[in-house]
Amino acid sequence: MERNTYFQGVKVIEFANVLAGPAVGMFFAELGAEVIKIENKNGGDLTRHWKTINENQNSKTSSYFHSVNWNKKSLFLDLLDESDHAVALQHISEAAIILVNFKAGDAKKFNLESDYLHKKFSHLIIGEIIGYPNSDRVAFDAVLQAETGFMSMNGNVDSDPLKMPIAFIDLLAAHQLKEGILIGLLQKNKTGKGSIVTVSLYESAIASLANQASNYLNNHQVPKLSGSLHPNIAPYGEVMVTKDNEQIILAIGTDHQFYCLCKVLDMEGLTNDMKYKSNLQRVKNRISLYEELKKVFCNFSADKLLAQFNIHKIPAGKINNLQQVFEDDNAKKMILQQMEEDQTISKRISTIAFNIE
């Protein structure tokens, strides 16, 4: 079964801007759903105009917009206009799923509140994204990264706290909403009734703190800026420079992997050094271990070293830029193309990274 047929015949109405909500809409579009994106008549989705300085300033849409708006039909409406509102309601009545991320007060202003829609169209699965669980504050990803602890952990000891270069909180919320909607659809198969699935950016971020949260909750350990270094494992996150000036990141998770690393590097003496004999000791002495490894890595070329690492099942990889990433055939397979109104070809990455057989 082709994955673009899973939701064939399902209609999704998207009242969503920017990244999180549209990413969910594109997920269903990729799986075969008919996705109608309702945009305001005054400029449409905010990201249509979020262009980098090297983009065609005369084009109607930005690369940012393209990233999560593949294979949708845009419908430009004024939801305060009676006839346009009727058009929106007609589409909603025919839909199985609607996606919303209205600003605080807008749903009421447009007479499209989730409770109202759920009562009027009891079959609907309504997926809504909000910023905070108990606040109507405006929510943007960078602020959430700061407030939920991510920025306090991201960066080097000699740098300011850094946000991640992708709006990860938005994407994490999108995944939460997909999961909630799919559960809602399963429930609907049992009861025949729809549901309202609400996801907040804030809770999505907190839910993703994983081991860093556990380290704090169990040990009162407040993470500090530590670059790529893992707080529980070493050498994990250390970046080494090779003879040909390539950068390799290590992700050594077991004593056996550390032994294999030392064997490939002809540094087996390190495995008998009490400072590095166990993972706990390596974490305690990771600075001196880094200095030992750094002196040897510069004697090897990256490709030959990585080939040996692969043979010995040592987790490590070269740090690639995006040009290098998209030279790989596996990455190329995930590119989706689309002809735009101005006859240009737009590209983006699939939101789907699974296969079902």
Image: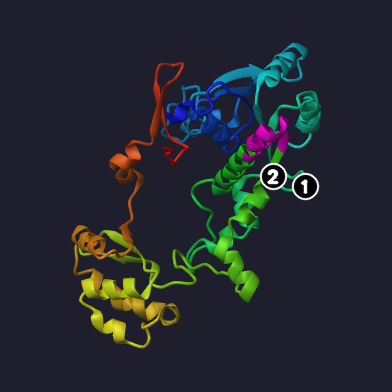
How far across and how far down the image is residue 257, in percent?
32, 71
User: Which residue is at 67% across, 51% downward?
Assistant: 202
Nearer-the-camera pick, 54 or 315: 315
Q: Are marks 2 and 1 in contact (CB under 8 Å)?
A: yes
Q: Residues within 10 Å of mark 2 (few under 14, many from 20)?
A: many
State yes or no: residue 188 in magenta.
Answer: yes
User: Which residue is at 38% across, 72% downward?
Assistant: 254
Residue lying at the far bottom in this picture: please name it.
274
Q: What residue is disc 2 on?
A: 131
User: Image height check: is 90 above or below 213?
Assistant: above
Tell me the SS state at disc 1. loop
How far across and how far down the image is residue 178, in percent?
59, 39
How far across and how far down the image is residue 110, in percent?
77, 25
Identify which amino acid the numbered label 1 is placed on: Ser
How far across and how far down the image is residue 357, in percent?
41, 37
Report the side of 308 relative to 11 (left or right).
left
Disc on res. 135: 1
State yes or no: residue 25 in magenta.
Answer: no
User: Image height check: is 289 above or below 162?
Assistant: below
Q: Which residues are magenta?
A: 183-196
Disc on res. 43: none
Nearer-the-camera pick, 17 or 195: 195
User: Which residue is at 43% across, 29% downward?
Assistant: 1
Q: For residue 229, say whether it is visible.
A: yes
Tell me the SS state at disc 2. loop
Report the side of 56 relative to 260 (left or right).
right
How far separated are the C-alphas under marks 2 and 1? Answer: 8 Å
